[in-house]
Amino acid sequence: MKSVRIIIFCFLFLIVAFLSLAGRCLYLQLLKNDHYVGVSTKQLQGWVSQKPQRGVILDCRGRILAASNRIRTIFAEPRVIKDAKSTSTELAPIVDMGAHEICKLITEGKNPGFVKIKVGAGAEQCSAAGEIYGIGVQSDWERHYPMRHLSAHIVGFTSVDNRGLGGIELQYDEELGGLGAQNIFFADALRRPIRRSSLVTGHEPRDGDGIILTLDASIQQFARAELVKQYESYEAESAVAIVAEPKTGAILAIVSLPDFDPRDARSADPNTLRNRAICDQFEPGSVLKPIVAAIAIDAGAVVGDEKIFCEYGDYRGRGFGRIGEYGNHKFGDLTVREILVRSSNIGMAKIGQKLGRDKLYNGLRLFGFGKKMGIDLPGEAEGLLWPARNWTGYSVTRIPYGQEISVTAIQLVRAFCILANGGRLVRPYLVKAVVGSDGEIIQLKRPSPAVGYVVKPEVAEWIVTEALVGVVNEGTGKKARLEKWQVFGKTGTANIAKSDERGYSDSDYIASFVAGAPAEEPAVVVLVSICKPNTKLGKGYTGGTVAAPVAAGILEKTLNYLEKRQRQHLFVVRRP
Amino acid sequence: MWFDSRFTIHLSGEQIMRLRFRFVFVVFYFTAVLIFAVYLRSTNNRIFNKLSTISTEQGRLEQQLRQKQLQLENLINPAAVSERLNGSE
């Protein structure tokens, strides 16, 4: 009997025990299911933030102006390191640094979670350092600018977190930036990824698109080298050079001095960060004369061989004060061609009066003055051209020789490109194409050929081949002559207005020269503008002395280079 | 093989041997299938891991290539060439 009771008791105990286990199983599997699934998923899951690679910026020949590459940083997490000395001793031979130096970084680091030990570590260093407890490796993108100062103002620069802050980097920040993502996956006990999670949020990461510019790094180098020489020689405050193709409007070079190294932009002088070619506006002086002459001849206000009396250097009248000539020249009768060759202010003032306020204003607006051009760079100034209703008698006589109007360098280049292109409208542009990270063209950015003429082709041709060639061969632009090509151009020596009182400074000038070659079929247009050359050096300050030689140097090198490229291209095409 | 009155199956020695072999073979085959099923089950994870490793390696090699490209560009860009030429003059 007793043994039967024991057996029954044991069985009952076993039944109760198994029922409790079953109950516990039910409780865990049904009621607490979500909780434990969550804990398990959290344990199993790992995630990797994938920062996209920023797109490249290339010149028209595929040379790298800006690109991103991976950089690995070995860092320490001081809050988990118990013994900084032993960790430093272990790490020192791996990173090739002194142990005491590493120890100091760990102990004196302000951030308890992250202290940089070595930036730009190699793959082997990283894998060895990662084995040490408390030491980690962070991978990030670093922006490189191989051309350094050369294209600084055009390319721009980026912030620490790879956002564009200037130039093309800023203008096309969205395209260049790409799209980051978070990759979530399941990991095993050793944290090795074994399966992609079904909970991937958002989208796949996408690297940034590339930007191809119309810029040619070789031509940019020619322009910069010539400009720097003169800029330093004349101790100028700033200088600008632009090279453009008149037929297409493609900009081949933009140089702005002083410039900076985009690798070091954060510590650069803020004064050097401005792209003066598009941001600075100035009174152009005599370089505007051919534009006004073209407008006047096109409107029929004057004809090319018409003689205009230039008052022997002293022109006065009611409503427009007194106008003199630069260098106190005393010109008598001059043709329109001679007015441009000798750069007569009085001649231009009279042309302006014959043309009239409205036609002059409309003509200048058609040439693009007084409004932004819409170039692919941030910070473009629109210049200053007062509405015609605000003009006085002074305006109609002063604007024709480049006073009482403010222009940017790029607007001047555009105007001369229009003349060099037979009077056809030209829209200068800098970005050729946007390409995907796989090299496929996403967007061609070349503006469609413009329809219509700003001035008649024969007027433009006459200005270029007669008047502006005369300026270089006989007039103020003799220093721009080249043996191999016929250069056309116009000098300009503009007084700079005083900042603290009315009137113009006697010692501050902007020396400019806008030129092109060959005159028969212009291939390039060059603008050189040097602000405040030091007059005390006694070397001169006029456009013909300061700016013309620079333009000649740029033209010669550029044309030789383009000729060579064309011959190479023909050679490549002809070969079977 | 013969049956007695209690429906007991009596087998000869040879038949018993054959049955044993079959039994061992079935157990063995069944075990192999089970092991292979487990192996197949984890193949997906293994291949994903391998793919991740190879992708990382590919990325690392691409970066190395880009690094070399940048180093080359640093040497042959017009500014650097001009600097070297001016220096040698």
Image: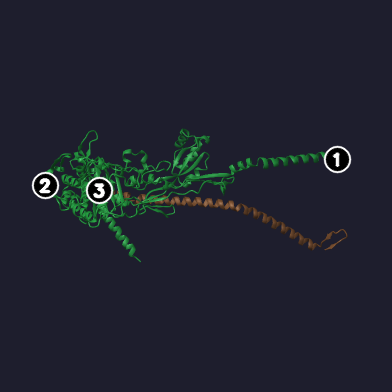
Report the Cα–Cα distance between label 1 and label 3. Answer: 122 Å
Task: Determine the chain carrying the residue at label 1.
Answer: A
Mark 2 near mark 3, Cβ–Cβ under 8 Å?
Answer: no
Q: Does any portion of residue B86 appear in the rendered image?
A: no
Q: Is disc 1 in the same subunit as disc 3? A: yes
Query: Chain B's shade in the image?
Result: brown
Quick check: A76 above or below A432?
above
Report the Cα–Cα distance between label 1 and label 2. Answer: 145 Å
Task: Determine the chain carrying the residue at label 2.
Answer: A
CA neighbours of label 2 inside 10 A, class few (<14), some (14 to 19), many (20+): few
Q: Amino acid at mark 1?
A: Val
Question: What residue is pinned by disc 3?
Answer: A363
Q: Point out residue A171 in the picture as x, y percentages from the top left corner.
A: 38, 45
Q: Quadrant of the N terminus of chain A?
A: top right
Question: What residue is pinned by disc 1?
Answer: A4
Q: Nearer the viewer, mark 1 or mark 2?
A: 2
Q: Is residue B88 left or right of residue A108?
A: left
First-in-chain label (2 vs 3): 2
Report the Cα–Cα distance between label 2 and label 3. Answer: 28 Å
Question: What residue is pinned by disc 2?
Answer: A332
